[in-house]
Structures are given as C-alpha cells and as structure tokens.
Image (cartoon, helix red, strand yellow):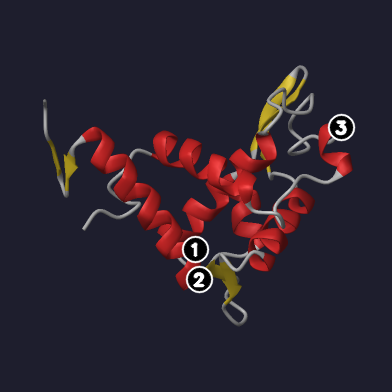
Amino acid sequence: MVSALDIRADLLINRLKDTLKTIESIKPPEWALFSKTGSGRERPPEQEDWWYIRAASILRTLYIEGPLGTERLRAKYGNRKSRGVSPSRSVKGSGHVIRKILQQLEEAGLVEKDGRKGRKVSAKGRSLLDKIASEIAREMKIEVGKVKVP
C-alpha cells in the first residue's frame, strides 16, 4: 500500500491543497491577504492560495514527524532575516498563521491534540493523505518503493 511517505512532497501538497479548498472550515481570514508569513519576510506571499498550500504542508509535516507543537512548526517555516550590513540570522515563522491553520485543521477533523506533546494527524487526516497518495501513485504508475517506467 502506498502512503504519503512514498510520494514527492510537491505533488502531494498540490493535490492536497485542492482538496483542502473544498473543506468549508478551512479558509483564509481577511487579514491573510496583507500579513507576512514571518518576521524575516519583507512582503506578504504573492500566491493567492498560499493559505491552502501552507495548510497542506503543515498537515503533511504532522503526518511525517508525529505530534508537533506551534514552536517546532515556527522553526520549520522560518527563514533568514536580512539585517543590512550585519550578518543574517535565522528567525521563526509566524506563530499566528500556524496556530490558525492548526485550529482550522482541527475543526475539520484532520488534526487532533495529543496531550502536551502538540497536535497529530487524526485517523480521518491520515486516510485523506493516504488516499491522495494512492491516487497520485496510480496516475504515475508507482509501486511501493519502486518507480515503473512506462
């Protein structure tokens, strides 16, 4: 059986993004058009559907790396901040964006809290990711661990 670990991240995230757009509880807030995704960024994202891309990426990360909290996700989605003449430094991503996405994914039933460890993918979320992964594998004719060339 093919899982989300066997599929390339870009293919899985793009397909998952389209699926998340159909879920009613996952939608960008009004302020998302104007906000940056971290203090190291100079401008807001240019893609119109960046909220769904980030939500899909967070869901995939939770699937792979297990229960994670907001701080670990902030570190993952951080970047290097340009400080002019001084050397660049690493900064964390926006906690507000990550927290809102986690709350929306939890409301949709795709993510659940795991005590004090953070959040993890629920059974519904795991089955959604595996279903999308198997669809992509079928289209690309991928077997588990192997790539078939047509």
147 or 117: nearer the viewer = 147
Position of 74 compared to 126: left or right? right
Q: Are marks 1 and 2 in contact (CB under 8 Å)?
A: yes
Estimate the x, y position of residue 75 in percent, counting from the top left: 61, 49
Whether residue 52 is visible here, answered yes or no, is yes
Residue extending furthest top? Answer: 85
Query: Residue tagged by mark 2?
Result: 122
Residue 80 image position (x, y, % from top left): 65, 31
Q: From the image, state whether disc 3 or disc 2 is nearer to you.
A: 2
Which residue carries the number 1 mark? 125
- Confirm or deny contact between disc 3 and disc 1 (CB under 8 A): no
The answer to whether 44 appears left or right of 101 in the picture is right
Question: How far is mark 3 from mark 2, CA to CA?
Answer: 31 Å
Relative placement, left or right, of 52 versus 12 is right
Name the secondary structure under disc 1: helix
Which residue corresponds to the image point at 79% horizontal and 24% vertical from the top-left?
A: 43
Asked which secondary structure carries label 2, the reply is: loop
Q: Secondary structure at mark 3?
A: loop
Residue type highlighted by circle 1:
Gly
Which residue lies at the image location 50% right of the left edge and 71% below the top edge?
Answer: 122
Quadrant of res 69: bottom right
Mark 3 vs mark 1: in front: 1
